[in-house]
Image (cartoon, coloured by chain):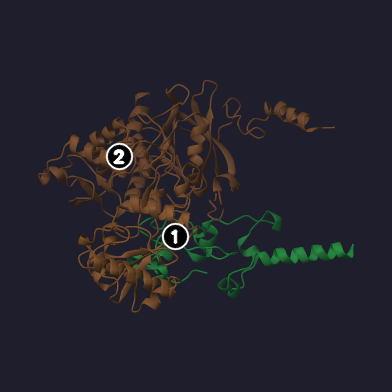
Chain colours: A brown, B green
Amino acid sequence: MLNRRNFIKTIVGTSVAVPGILNANDNLGKDIKFDEIADVIIIGSGVSAHICAAYLVKNKIDVLMIEKMDRIGGNSALSQQDFAVLNSDLQIKAGIKDSEELFLNDLNKAGAGYNHLEHSLRIIRNSNEAYEFAKSCGVKYADKLKFLGGHSVARSVETIGGGGACISTLNEFFIKHNGKIKNETKCDEIIQDESGKIIGVSVRENYRFNRNLANDDRENLSGDKKHYKARLAVVFATGGFSRDIEFRSIVNPRLRLAKSPSSLGQTAGALKQMLKVGAIPTQLALSRFSFGIPTEDLIYGIMVDCNAKRFLNEDGDRQGLSNKILAHMEKINTTIYPIIIFDSTGFANSHDPNRMQSFITAGKMKKFDSLSDLANNFKLNENDLSKTMQDYETGISNNKDEFKKDLSKIKNSSMSKAPFYAMTAAPGLSYTPGGVYADINMRVLNISNYEPIKGLYAIGEATGGVHGQSRLTSCSIPDCMTSGIACAKDILKGV
Amino acid sequence: MQKLLMILILSIFALGNEFVIKPHHIEVKLKCTDCHKEANEKDYKALDSNSCLSCHGSKEKLAKRLDFLKGKNPHNSIHDNANLNCYTCHNEHKPSFNMCNTCHNTKTWMREIK
C-alpha cells in the first residue's frame, strides 16, 4: 500500500534519476541535455533586449533572443519612444544649456527622491552614447527637440515612426549580424550549476499566449519543453507586470482596479523566476499611470462617479488623480470608471483644442447635444447628474467649490452650455517602476549577500528602483538603452 | 448499457458542435481534413499561419488588400508591420479577437472581425 508519506518518498527517490520532470525545483544543470547553445540568451524582445543584442552581435557575440508572444517588441512596439538625451547633437545645435545637475534634479523631483542615484547618473551620463548607438543601427530621429513636462530644458528627441519603427530597425540590424530570434518561446525556469552560476534556461517552444486565462504564467500548458544553454550570460529584458492583475493587487491593492493599456504579455512570470534564484525585489508597490486625456485640461470640467456625483478636485497631475479615482472606486465598491464632462465653454478652454478634436474623431470622447443623451450614454441618473452640475455652477457663482478647486484658474468655464463633451476617465497602469535590483553593470544581485548572481543580468523595465516614485516622461528609453549597453559591455569584459 | 451508448453519442455530437466553421469557409465547402492533416482526429493541433497562407497567399499580399486603410492597416501596422501570425486575431472555431481594439477604438475605421 502506497500511503501519502511513502508516495512522497518514492517521488523524491526517483527525482534523481528523472530530473526536471517530477521535481520542478531541481534546476541544477547536471544531467540536462541542451537543445540550443548560444553565448548569450536574452529573454524578451523590447527596446532593452534589442539594443543589448545589437551591441553584442556587433561585437561578434552569438546571441539568441526569445519572446513568449507572437508580437516582437512587447510594450516598446506600442510606445511613442520620446527619448531624453543630455547634450545630444540637437541640443548643441539649438544652443541649449543643459547639465548633469539639471537633469538629475528633474529626475529626482519626479521620483520624489526614491530613485537610486547611481542609476539616475547611469541614465544621464550614457544617454548620448545610447542615442548615437541607436542611430548607428539605423533608428531615425526627428530633427527637432521636444520640451516635455517635468524637464527644465528641451532635451527629448522624437523617434520617427515610434516604437514600431525602432524595434523593426533594430531587429533587422540584429538579424543581419547573425542574431537569432524565436518568438512564441516562453522561458519557464532559470538553470543553475552547483555553484549557483546561471547556465541556461528551460523554455517551451510553440507557446501560445492565452489572453483569456486569469494567469497565463500558471495556467497555460501549451508548447514543447526544451533546454537552452548560455555560455556567457542570461539577460532578462522582460518588462513590467502591469497586465498581471493578480500580482499587482498583491504588491499594491490600490492597483487592482486600474485599466491595463499595456501589451498583453506584461505578466509577473519572469520577475518570479528571478526571485526564485535569489534576486532582490525593489519598489514593487509603485505605479505609473497614463490617462486618456491631458490632465491639465480636467480643471475646466467635472468628474463624476457612477452615481453622477463629484468626488474630487479635478485639478491635479495624472498620478495624484489616478490614485484618488482608484481609491474612490474601492470606497463605493464599483468597477465602473468615472466620467469626465465638459460643457462647450470648458471644452473650448483646452490648451490643445486640436488634440481634443482628435479624441472625438477617434471615438474616445463623445459630443452630446443634450444632458439626457449624455446621461443615457453613460448610464447615469439624469436628475442626479443635473443636480451635480447645478451645485457646481452654484459653487462657481459663490466662488467656493465643494472640493476646494481654485476657481480663479478655470477661465470662466461653466457647466450648463450645450453641447456637452464626455469621456471615461480610466487610470491606466502602463508601466511598473518596481522590479529586481541590479548594479550599474546590470548584474542582478543576490538577496543573501548582495553579490552579483553569476551569469544573470536584468535590463529595462524588469529592473526596479531606477525611477523612484514616478518616472519622468521620455526617460524610459534612455533607461532601457543605457542599461542594455551597460549589460552588453559587462558581458564583453568576460570574453 | 443503452443509456451509456446514448450519452456517448450525445457527447460525440457535442464535440462536433464545439468546432464550428466560419460561414465563409462553409461556403467554399471546407472540411476538417482540408486544414488538419493528422490522420487521427484525436491528434489535431492548432494550426500555424502557413496553413492559412496556403490558400490566402502571403502576409504581404493580404496587407496590400487593406492598403486603403493607410496608416491604420491591421495587416501592416506601425507596431508590427506584416509580422503577426493570423491566429493572433483570427480564430476559426471561436469568435475572433481584434487586438487593435485593446488600445484603439476601431469602430470608426474597421469592420468587426468574425
User: Quick one: SS at disc 1?
Assistant: helix
Same subunit under labels 2 and 1?
A: no
Where, quadrant-wise, is the N terminus of chain A in this rendering? Answer: top right
Q: Nearer the viewer, residue A488 or A245?
A: A245
The location of residue A248, given as percent across then percent down, is: 48, 45
Judging by the rendered image, the residue that carries numbered circle 2 is: A112
Letter of the chain that mark 1 sits on in the rendering: B
The location of residue A348, given as percent across then percent down, is: 23, 69
- Contact flag, marks 2 and 1 (Cβ < 8 Å): no
Q: Which mark is residue A279?
A: none
Letter of the chain that mark 2 sits on in the rendering: A
The residue sitting at 35% across, 50% down in the picture is: A168
Judging by the rendered image, the residue that carries numbered circle 1 is: B102
Image-quadrant location for residue B70:
bottom left
User: Is residue B85 shown left or right of residue B92?
Assistant: left
| Crowding near the residue tagged with mark 1, few <14, some 14–19, many ≥20 C-alpha atoms within 10 Å | some
Residue situated furthest right in the rendering: B1
> How far apart are the two marked residues, 2 and 1, measured between alpha carbons?
32 Å
Q: Nearer the viewer, residue A43 or A395?
A: A395
User: Quick one: SS at disc 2?
Assistant: loop
Does A196 appear above or below A71? above
| Crowding near the residue tagged with mark 2, few <14, some 14–19, many ≥20 C-alpha atoms within 10 Å | some
The location of residue A324, given as percent across then percent down, is: 38, 53
Where, quadrant-wise, is the C terminus of chain A in this rendering? Answer: top left
Identified by mark 2, the residue type is Ala
Residue situated furthest left in the rendering: A95
Image-quadrant location for residue A193:
top right
Q: Nearer the viewer, residue A163 or B48?
A: A163
Identified by mark 1, the residue type is Thr
Visible residue check, residue A130? no
Question: Which mark is in front, 2 or 1?
Answer: 2
